[in-house]
Amino acid sequence: MSSPTLLVTGASGHLGRTVVRHLLETLKVPAASIIATSRKPEALADLATAGVTVRAADFDAPATLAAAFAGADRVLLVSTDALLEPGKRLAQHRAAVQAAAEAGVKHVVYTSLPSPATSHVSFAPDHLGTEQALAASGLGWTVLRNAWYAENLAYSLPSALASGEWVTAAGNGGVAYIAREDLARAAAVALAADSTENRTFTLTGTQALSAGDIAAKVAAATGKPLSVVGVTPEQLAEGLRGHGFPPVLADVFTSFDVATAAGDLGEVTDDFAALTGHAPSAFDAWLPAHLDLLTKPH
């Protein structure tokens, strides 16, 4: 029996590219059974050389997507980064789900976020709407509700370490950070699985850590003092706008702290191990290997 054809969208992005690597190296999926799509297919020349089929796929041009998905049995739909235009990302995802159905895809794996129906994260409705589109599509589906990347700390910690103060509206809320590498592995496993069952996994790290917890660990690892300064969401948003953030993006980042304070990102589950057969990396193991990411301005 021939191997199913697996397609990864957004394959030139950090997550998508790492998923393809895990398919090839960790799971030993034949390159000939993998399709990698991107708005920038030229960025995937190395994968093409390795025998992966590379195709252009533009979620803003829905008419092109069915051809991009042609021949794929299972598709990993990596959520797009269209955050600055409300409604755009959900429209992109709905177009992709429709195109997958039209192309004869059997199963879609989607990267969502924890508790999308109740989360205070500003773009949670995009994820909820995509999950609903999948449920209504007639396609088989696996939803991966990915907890916050540990790598997301690179947005705030370099400047916080430079000043010695981490300004946050997260209060004592915890985040169950998980490494992007682990989430990519989980996505590869879900994509390559022979299961046709509709399943939802909430993929988290091993513990929920507050800003105070993170600050203490980072200060110890770097030898630099780092104190947490609590502010209101309104003060945080105003500060971000003052530092040049577009208002929409300032509101997005503020919503992360509001969600954290509300407990939306603190759930810890065993779903990663259930899916992959392995425990995710602990934050204390991830941190020393990624100090450059957290200390150098981006």
Image (tube, grey):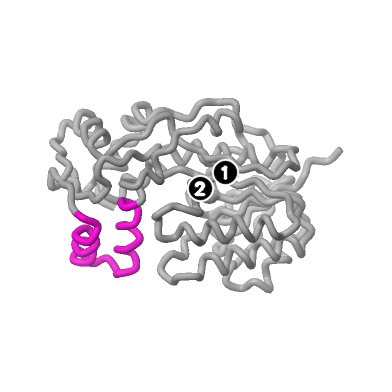
Q: Residue at x 52, y 30 (%)?
A: 270
Residue 170 as seen in the image, left or right of residue 285: left
Asked if the residue at tag 2 contacts the one at tag 1, i.e. Cβ–Cβ closer than 8 Å, the answer is yes
- What element does badge 1 sit on? helix
Q: Residue at x 19, y 60 (%)?
A: 235
Say what amino acid the circle numbered 2 marks: Leu
Q: Residues within 10 Å of mark 1 (few under 14, many from 20)?
A: many
| Relative image position of residue 100 (x, y in whole percent) | 71, 60
- Magenta stretch holds residue 204: no
Q: Is 191 positioned to the left or the right of 253 in the image? A: right
- In the rendered image, residue 103, in percent from the top left (x then y), is placed at 77, 62
Residue denoted by label 2: 15
**Which residues are the magenta region?**
232-258
Q: Position of residue 283 (x, y in %)?
A: 37, 31
Q: Main secondary structure of the magenta part?
A: helix
Residue furthest toward the right?
1
Q: Quadrant of the N terminus?
A: top right
| Among the 4 quarters of the image, the one containing residue 71 | bottom right
Q: Is residue 91 left or right of residue 180?
A: right
Viewer-proximal residue, 49 or 117?
117
Side of 17 where 194 appears, left or right: right
Check disc 1 and report the residue beneath it: 19
The local crowd at label 2, few if under 14, some if 14 to 19, many if 20 or more residues have their Cα within 10 Å, is many
C-alpha separation, residue under disc 1 versus residue under disc 2: 6 Å
Q: Which residue appears at 79% of the width and 41% of the height?
A: 3
The amino acid type found where label 1 is placed reads Val
